[in-house]
């Protein structure tokens, strides 16, 4: 079903990375600029992520011998340094996820560039190196984002949904490796219910909510794909939900033929096999359009 599966390292049947977006309470402050600070219940729900969820997740990774990727807004790095230190101490990747969860697609290019660079400085200071990867908040990648990332030496993006395997984004400033996911691998539709965030989904029992992730994994495993859940410490990091996820991870690791790695390592592998000719990725030219698409005027005959 996948015409061009990537030759994964050591004959692995698929590649996987559980990517956590540690947005913390940046979401409330962006959604409610005037009174977000006073929404104490919502703040407590989101602060659960860096204060309770992240230490639990990192400890599980240590026990399983995993290193994965956390996408973190720079404001959250400044606000919750202990959570970021725990990620780094466990050998996990910390990647770019905006400054305070602003949406690139809602900003003029100059403002998008400003917040991108401001966050870059924070990440460099906290981790000692420039980030290799980027994920746009709520997947809101703009028609300027690829150029801004390529010009700054980013290696990969993880915002788009155009394939089941890695592919390339070519733009005027260079190229990026796209490590795609999709909404079926996001935990918001399964677990998030918050009137403060204007998102009211019917909350599923942990095993029922996780079933979509399991089925997506098994398809990737059968066909040589890429399994990248987009999950959040305040949601999937909750006790019962993480118990289900961690048990699944242990079972999959016992198979011995699934490659779990940070996103930067997956991207590096894709670049290597592309360069040596063992993989021929699909390529998208960005932006897809250079102007609005106008409907054809109706003419009454």
Image: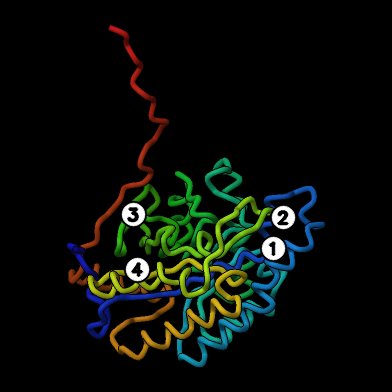
Which secondary structure lies at badge 2? helix
Q: Quadrant of the N terminus?
A: bottom left
Query: Label 2 to label 3, Cα distance in Å?
Result: 31 Å
Compared with residue 132, is residue 299 higher up or lower down, i.e. above or below? above
Q: Are marks 2 and 1 in contact (CB under 8 Å)?
A: yes
Q: Earlier in the sequence, mark 4 or mark 2?
A: 2
The residue closer to the viewer here, 290 or 148, is 290
Compared with residue 101, is residue 243 higher up or lower down, i.e. above or below? below
Return the residue at label 2: 29
Q: Residue 240, how many percent across, how many down?
A: 57, 79
Left or right of 184 on screen, residue 299: left
Return the residue at label 4: 216
Q: Residue 27, how many percent across, how many down?
A: 66, 57
Which secondary structure lies at badge 4? helix
Return the residue at label 1: 25
Query: Label 2 to label 1, Cα distance in Å?
Result: 7 Å
Residue name at image x 30 percent, y 50 percent: 284
Return the residue at label 3: 162
**In the rendered image, which quarter is residue 23 located in?**
bottom right
Compared with residue 109, is residue 16 higher up or lower down, i.e. above or below? below
Q: Residue 65, how many percent across, how many down?
A: 45, 91
């Amino acid at each position: 079903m996948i015409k061009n599966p990537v030759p994964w390292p050591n004959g692995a049947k698929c590649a996987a990375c559980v990517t956590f977006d540690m947005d913390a309470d940046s979401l409330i402050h962006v959604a409610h600029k005037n009174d977000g600070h006073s929404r104490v219940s919502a703040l407590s729900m989101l602060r659960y992520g860096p204060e309770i969820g992240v230490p639990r997740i990192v400890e599980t990774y240590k026990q399983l011998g995993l290193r994965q990727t956390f996408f973190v807004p720079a404001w959250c790095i400044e606000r919750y340094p202990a959570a970021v230190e725990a990620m780094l101490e466990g050998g996990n990747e910390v990647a770019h996820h905006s400054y305070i969860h602003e949406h690139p697609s809602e900003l003029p290019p100059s403002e998008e560039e400003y917040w991108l660079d401001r966050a870059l400085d924070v990440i460099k200071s906290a981790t000692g190196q420039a980030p290799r990867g980027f994920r746009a908040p709520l997947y809101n990648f703009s028609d300027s984002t690829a150029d801004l990332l390529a010009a700054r030496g980013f290696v990969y993006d993880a915002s788009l949904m155009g394939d089941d395997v890695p592919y390339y984004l070519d733009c005027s400033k260079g190229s990026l490796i796209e490590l795609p996911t999709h909404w079926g691998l996001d935990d918001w539709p399964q677990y998030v219910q918050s009137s403060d965030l204007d998102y009211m989904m019917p909350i599923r029992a942990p095993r029922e909510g996780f079933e979509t992730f399991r089925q997506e994994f098994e398809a990737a495993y059968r066909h040589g794909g890429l399994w990248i859940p987009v999950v959040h410490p305040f949601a999937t990091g909750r006790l019962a939900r993480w118990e289900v996820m961690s048990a699944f991870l242990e079972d999959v690791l016992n198979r011995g033929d699934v490659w779990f790695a940070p996103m930067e390592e997956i991207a590096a592998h894709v670049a290597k096999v592309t360069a040596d000719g063992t993989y021929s990725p699909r390529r998208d030219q960005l932006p897809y359009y250079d102007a609005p698409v106008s409907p054809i005027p109706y003419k009454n005959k």
